[in-house]
Image: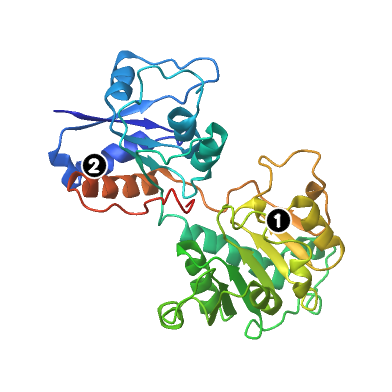
């Protein structure tokens, strides 16, 4: 029997990457057919016969989180899915974050968790996000953003480009999961002190996390107060939304750290972030995520002199990397073994 797996994604080349990985995997012994399915439009979903059959038969699905959430969990999905995707047992998301599924659950007022297993695209973001954070810290500390101005002025600006040692500087990382650990590891290698925030700590953290953090604490005030750079990598959950209030951030005032957000934008309200910058609580903010995305054109963050922003590109879901995660999980699923990066419906991530 052929196992048809639809790929519902806007990631160009994902289906081809999955087929290539499958050819060299243990799952190749199975009759697996990867079927590329176009992303549905608001008013219609143009499908050929093979695509429709794959969606009708599908027990496994590889999908972007926003598309999978809409199709599988929306009370009134657009377009109506009718007999499609009614047998799904496992969804592999192409994103590391899976907030769209939980937002759709809330919108649908669904009291019980979904019956399908959800796995996220873990393991593919730590290096890219660590590079992004490290790149910005180095650019700011070494004043790379000013170099071209000096060049245009024919200014041989040795004094202006002096810098401080990294050894006494502390990077505070909010969230020491897989990505936070990757960031901490790179920061420690570069010579920074690293203090990590975890909601729940254990006696083993000092040993297990010693390669990525000099100190681990469940005291948010302690981490914020120690940091010269505050790096947020926390997911969006009921416990983290609005966590960084202006009042909470007052412990940052003595050091006036740079705030770098590569986690989720709703950890702080935009108005409070702007106020923290205006009041000198934060000296600068490097933002890759926002409370509302895309960032509205009228947002004051666009023109704030102490904000540097990018459009949620600190780490992208590249087809080859997503395919690696999916094929590994497919192999495990076919062997009835626990899959990688499962999502806990109760915890929200």
Q: Which residue is mark 2?
A: 22
Of 12 and 329, nearer the camera is: 329
- Residue 341 in the image: state x and y as whole percent: 37, 54
Tell me: residue 86, above or below residue 337: above
Of 113 and 220, nearer the camera is: 113
- x 82%, y 62%: residue: 277
- x 64%, y 79%: residue: 170
Q: Is residue 46 left or right of residue 174?
A: left
Tell me: residue 136, above or below residue 266: below
Of 329 and 28, nearer the camera is: 329
Mark 2 and 1 residues: CB-CB less than 8 Å, in contact? no
Q: Is residue 127 left or right of residue 132?
A: left
- x 57%, y 78%: residue: 194
Q: Earlier in the sequence, mark 2 or mark 1?
A: 2
The mark closer to the camera, 2 or 1, is 1
- Residue 259 in the image: state x and y as whole percent: 70, 64
Tell me: residue 202, above or below residue 237: below
Q: Which circle marks residue 268 in the picture?
A: 1
Within 10 Å of disc 2 (Cα), the crowding (few <14, some 14-19, many 20+) is many
Q: Is residue 39 left or right of residue 336?
A: right
Q: Which circle marks residue 214 in the picture?
A: none
- Residue 114 in the image: state x and y as whole percent: 40, 38
Within 10 Å of disc 1 (Cα), the crowding (few <14, some 14-19, many 20+) is some
Of 324 and 100, nearer the camera is: 100
Element type where label 2 sits in the image: helix
Element type where label 1 sits in the image: loop
Report, in whole angstroms, how far the alpha carbon at label 2 lies from the one at label 1. Answer: 42 Å
- Residue 284 in the image: state x and y as whole percent: 76, 64
């Amino acid at each position: 029997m052929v196992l048809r797996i639809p790929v519902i994604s806007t990631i160009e080349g994902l289906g081809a990457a999955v087929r290539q990985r499958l050819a060299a995997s243990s799952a190749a012994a199975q009759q697996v057919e990867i079927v590329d399915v176009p992303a549905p439009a608001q008013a219609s979903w143009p499908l050929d016969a093979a695509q429709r059959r794959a969606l009708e038969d599908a027990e496994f699905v590889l999908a972007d989180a926003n598309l999978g959430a809409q199709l599988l969990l929306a009370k009134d999905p657009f377009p109506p899915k009718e007999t499609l995707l009614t047998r799904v047992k496992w969804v592999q998301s192409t994103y590391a974050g899976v907030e769209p599924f939980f937002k759709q659950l809330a919108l649908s007022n669904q009291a019980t968790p979904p019956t399908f297993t959800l796995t996220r695209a873990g393991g593919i973001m730590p290096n890219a996000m660590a590079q992004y954070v490290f790149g910005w810290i180095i650019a700011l500390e070494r004043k790379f953003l000013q170099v071209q101005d000096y060049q245009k002025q024919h200014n041989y600006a040795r004094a202006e480009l002096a810098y401080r040692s990294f050894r006494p500087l502390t990077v505070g990382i909010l969230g020491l999961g897989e990505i936070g650990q990757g960031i901490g590891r790179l920061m420690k290698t570069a010579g920074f002190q690293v203090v990590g925030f975890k909601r729940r700590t254990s006696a083993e953290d000092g040993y297990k996390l010693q390669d990525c953090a000099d100190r681990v604490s469940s005291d948010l005030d302690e981490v914020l107060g120690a940091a010269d750079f505050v790096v947020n990598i926390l997911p969006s959950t009921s416990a983290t939304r609005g966590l960084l209030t202006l009042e909470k951030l007052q412990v940052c005032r003595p050091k006036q750290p740079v705030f770098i957000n590569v986690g989720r934008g709703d950890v702080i309200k935009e108005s409070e972030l702007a106020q923290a910058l205006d009041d000198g609580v934060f000296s600068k903010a490097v933002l890759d995520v926002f409370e509302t995305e895309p960032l509205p054109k009228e947002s004051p963050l666009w023109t704030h002199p102490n904000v540097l922003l990018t459009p949620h590109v600190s780490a992208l879901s590249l087809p080859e990397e997503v395919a690696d995660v999916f094929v590994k999980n497919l192999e495990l699923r076919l062997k009835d073994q626990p899959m990688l990066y499962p999502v806990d419906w109760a915890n929200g991530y």
